[in-house]
Image (cartoon, rainbow, N blue to C red):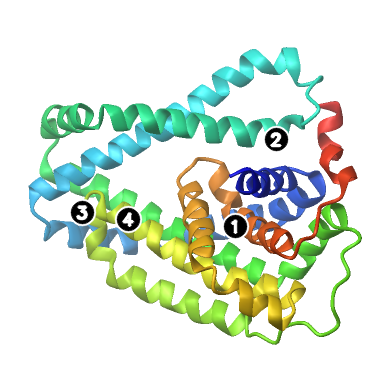
Amino acid sequence: MGAVYGIFHRSIRDLVRWEVLREVLVTGIPMILIWLGIGWVFWDKLLYWSTLLISWVPFSVVKANGAMLVLFLLWALAVLVSYAFLTAIVGPLFFRRMKKGYYYYSFTALLGFAMLWGWLMMLNWGSLEKWIANKLLVWLPFQTVAEGSAVLLNFYVFYSFYILSLFLVLSLYRKDFLETVREIEYPDLEIAAEKVKVSHLPVALRDSLLFIVLTVLFFPLLMIPIVNVLIQLFLWAWLYRDATFRGTCQLYCSTEEYERLRHHRAVIWSIAFFASLLNFVPIINIFTPFFAQLVVFHWIMQSKGIANSPAAQTQTPKKSEGA
């Protein structure tokens, strides 16, 4: 258990180092702008098809799904408001004294509030869903509920393709990203000249294409509560699990190490599912492909028996020194 915690802790710590975070932001922010532009152009066309699809769904299903979507929005809003409230109180007092820096605080605080509010809503799930479905949504005409669900479906589609684009960019430039981390965490690592010969980019492209196909095929099921969440988790985890592992091993594993590690499918799937869960957390979700890559990288380093640099454990992000 301690080893698992160490892997995730190092991954979070590396993600918020300025050297690493800079590369994440340089990739993530332009992708956000690109997909905002694509959404602006194709929004109405996709909304037409989403609304048409929902018109074929029974009202009871639309209402139940609408209640779930409202709960999800309330959860996301509660996470953001709690984070903003805590930051307003803690910020002036502690930010200048925090050794871990503002980025580390933000990641852990958002993740903590996400788990807290998720747990509280799960405890009261039945009563909350019943109140929204029977009290709130019944005040709205069917067309309004349908159009509201269609808008949220549109957001899901464009957001999924945003995650997919980040995954593809990271697959192409994973060496630059991981070498930045390796130079900090494992500066003494000797990379073997004879690395494993395993395909990575073709697998990433294949999985991306299948991700698109499965998203289209499963699109009608996104109107079914709970099922839609499970489908999203599966698709994202399926996208992450193989190509991320292969791409990392291609850079740092020998053939023997790859053959040994690839049989740990439960570990690889667990990492992919955890990263997929983070896709639901506001703000953190734009970092999830990079986080999944870091977790796999540290897991492979640990499996190789390589210890990280003691200096890296105390190094702080450059930006946070004056935060």
CA gap between label 3 and label 1 equals 28 Å
Is residue 41 in sight in this rendering? no
* Left or right, residue 303 beside residue 149: right
The crowding category of the residue bearing disc 4, from other C-alpha atoms within 10 Å (few below 14, some 14 to 19, many at least 20), is: few
Q: Quadrant of the C terminus?
A: top right
Which element carries disc 3, helix, strand or loop? Answer: loop
- Which residue: 70% across, 87% down? 197
Q: Secondary structure at mark 1?
A: helix
| Three-letter residue code for mark 1 | Ala
Disc 3: which residue: 224
- Which numbered mark, 4 or 3, is in the foreground of this view? 4
Separation of disc 4 and disc 3 at Cα?
A: 10 Å
Q: What amino acid is at disc 3?
A: Ile
Secondary element under disc 4, as helix, strand or loop, is: helix
185 displayed left or right of 232: right
Query: Which disc, if any, is residue 230?
Result: 4
Callout 3 touching callout 1 (CB < 8 Å): no
Instruction: Give the Cα distance between marks 4 and 2.
Output: 29 Å
Whether residue 155 is visible: yes
Query: Of the residues shown, which amino acid type is indicated by label 4?
Result: Leu
Specify the quadrant that holds the N terminus: top right
Residue to which mark 2 is pinned: 104
Residue wearing tag 1: 292
Earlier-in-chain disc, 3 versus 1: 3
